[in-house]
Amino acid sequence: MTRRDAVLDAAIEVLADGGMRRLTHRAVDERAALPAGATSNVCRTRGALVSGVLGRIAERELALWGAVVTGAAERGGVDSFADALATLVDRLAREHPALTRARQAVVADPEAMAAARDAHAGALARIRARLVAELRTLGLPAAEADHSLVLALLDGLLLARVTAPDEGPDVRRAIASLLTGLRAGPPSAGA
């Protein structure tokens, strides 16, 4: 792990535990057990730190996506892809809840989002590209447009799992229902 990764992973933990108000270079140095000033050497400004955090969250989520989701649509259609996405949500919630809590802390803060707008857009673009490719493999007629519905559902399910792990909807069923509906296309005008 590089020093940059260690700093950004520590910043994710700080955000997850204390939100944007707690995110300082000093708090990250302490969390990473690094000498004072180490975080500032990696990310000079708070905006750079927040941008780095969003990029690192996307990097870690995409690594898990690659291990769990990539190719699932091709291997087994909607059922396989729904299973893979449900596994992704479950693993992110159980093994990496700090990623979701940190992302929520950033997106809920208008000032932080303004500073990290480009990083956020870049992270979304990488996730979107992978999702759209899988949705095309499933044969969704509007994969480019429908990816946002799938992302919204995944974000909601993930947040529900992180905040109330023993409650909430059946993740796999919710995903499969949405994918099946999207695959069928919009209802006809006379329906």
Image (cartoon, helix red, strand yellow):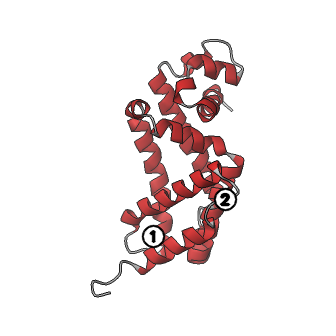
Q: Name the residue under label 1.
A: 136
Residue at the extreme left: 189
Residue 55 appears anywhere in the view: no
- Looking at the picture, which amino acid does disc 2 mark? Glu
- Looking at the picture, which amino acid does disc 1 mark? Arg
Q: Which of 155 and 78 is in front in this view?
A: 155
Tell me: 46 left or right of 118: right
Instruction: Estimate the x, y position of residue 59 in percent, counting from the top left.
Output: 57, 43
The residue sitting at 45% across, 56% down in the picture is 129
Q: Name the residue under label 2.
A: 167
Quarter of the figure with residue 167: bottom right
Instruction: Estimate the x, y position of residue 98 in percent, counting from the top left.
Output: 64, 40
Give the answer, above or below, for where 137 lies relative to 39: below
In this view, the mark in front (1 or 2): 2
Mark 1 is surrounded, within 10 Å at the Cα level, by few (under 14), some (14 to 19) or many (20 or more) other residues, namely some
Lower sequence index among marks 1 and 2: 1
Q: What element carries label 1?
A: helix
Instruction: Estimate the x, y position of residue 111 in percent, counting from the top left.
Output: 40, 30
Give the answer, above or below, for where 171 lies relative to 64: below
The residue sitting at 57% across, 19% down in the picture is 25
Q: Which of 1 and 89 is in front in this view?
A: 89
Quick one: quadrant of the N terminus?
top right
Tell me: 26 left or right of 105: right
The residue sitting at 55% across, 68% down in the picture is 175
Mark 2 is surrounded, within 10 Å at the Cα level, by few (under 14), some (14 to 19) or many (20 or more) other residues, namely few
Between marks 1 and 2, how big is the CA–CA gap? Answer: 32 Å
The residue sitting at 45% across, 70% down in the picture is 136
Give the answer, above or below, for where 88 lies relative to 9: below
Residue 180 appears anywhere in the view: yes
Q: What element carries label 2?
A: loop
